[in-house]
Amino acid sequence: MRIQATPIKDLLIIEPRVFPDSRGYFFESYNEKQMYEAGIQIRFVQDNQSKSTKGVLRGLHYQLNPFAQTKLLRVLQGTVVDVAVDIRNDSITFGKSFAIELSCENKLQLLIPKGFAHGFSVLSDTAIVLYKCDSFYNPSAERGILFSDPALKIDWGFDIKSAIVSHKDMQHALLKDAEMNF
């Protein structure tokens, strides 16, 4: 596995070693020992999976401390633009976003630590996204930031005026008004 830094500290791209052959391919999508040896010592406790259709936009979600979650995301089917926004108050990149195309073809994964809001948009006809979490979901700690906040300048890969967004995600606060404790 290859671990790549991003312009935002602690936000990492994980590229598995893929072994293709005439039958298809094989790769380890997660190896705790290799992660620990790379200095990433996280114990995942929950896996989540979602299926979405083209044009769906989910996010930007996070949980407040002490229920904040580190997430390791990958795409099992299709293609998404995956976005993380740094909401750590003491970070020099506070309010900055990072976007990456994740797909079943490129097999890249994004490790999003606590203190980030997360979302994704679906570019393919359908997308199945799987993510591991190091803390259990806690509805009372769930918060969000409006995906269309102009201060974030996020490129979701398509015109967000036509995005399919849940009513709940449409109600999130702007970054400047969001409740955060990181």
Image (cartoon, helix red, strand yellow):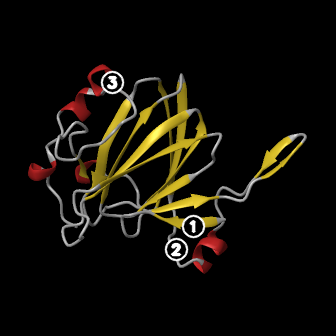
Q: In the rendered structure, find residue 40 and report the number of the disc placed on it.
A: 2
Q: Is residue 107 left or right of residue 141?
A: right
Q: CA distance from mark 2 to mark 1?
A: 10 Å
Amino acid tagged 3: Ala
Q: Judge whether 90 appears above or below 169 on screen.
A: below
In this view, the residue farthest toward the right is 22
> Disc 2 or 1, which lies upstream in sequence?
1
Q: In the rendered structure, find residue 3 and report the number of the disc placed on it.
A: 1
Whole-percent x, y for residue 21 in the image? 88, 46
- Quarter of the view holding residue 160: top left
Whether pointer 2 and pointer 1 mark residues with C-beta atoms closer than 8 Å, the reply is yes
Whether pointer 3 and pointer 1 mark residues with C-beta atoms closer than 8 Å, the reply is no
Most foreground residue, 111 or 159: 159
Q: Is residue 6 left or right of residue 77?
A: left
- Quarter of the view holding residue 15: bottom right
Q: CA distance from mark 3 to mark 1?
A: 32 Å
Which residue is found at the position 14% from the left and 55% from the top?
A: 179
Amino acid tagged 2: Ile
Q: In the rendered structure, find residue 68 and report the number of the disc placed on it.
A: none
Indicate the secondary structure of the residue bearing disc 3.
Answer: loop
Q: Is residue 161 left or right of residue 157?
A: left
Amino acid tagged 1: Ile
Indicate the secondary structure of the residue bearing disc 2.
Answer: loop
Closer to the eye: label 2 or 3: 3
Whole-percent x, y for residue 34 in the image? 65, 73
Whole-percent x, y for residue 110 in the image? 49, 55
Q: In the rendered structure, find residue 163 and report the number of the disc placed on it.
A: 3
Whole-percent x, y for residue 171 in the image? 17, 34
> Disc 3 or 1, which lies upstream in sequence?
1
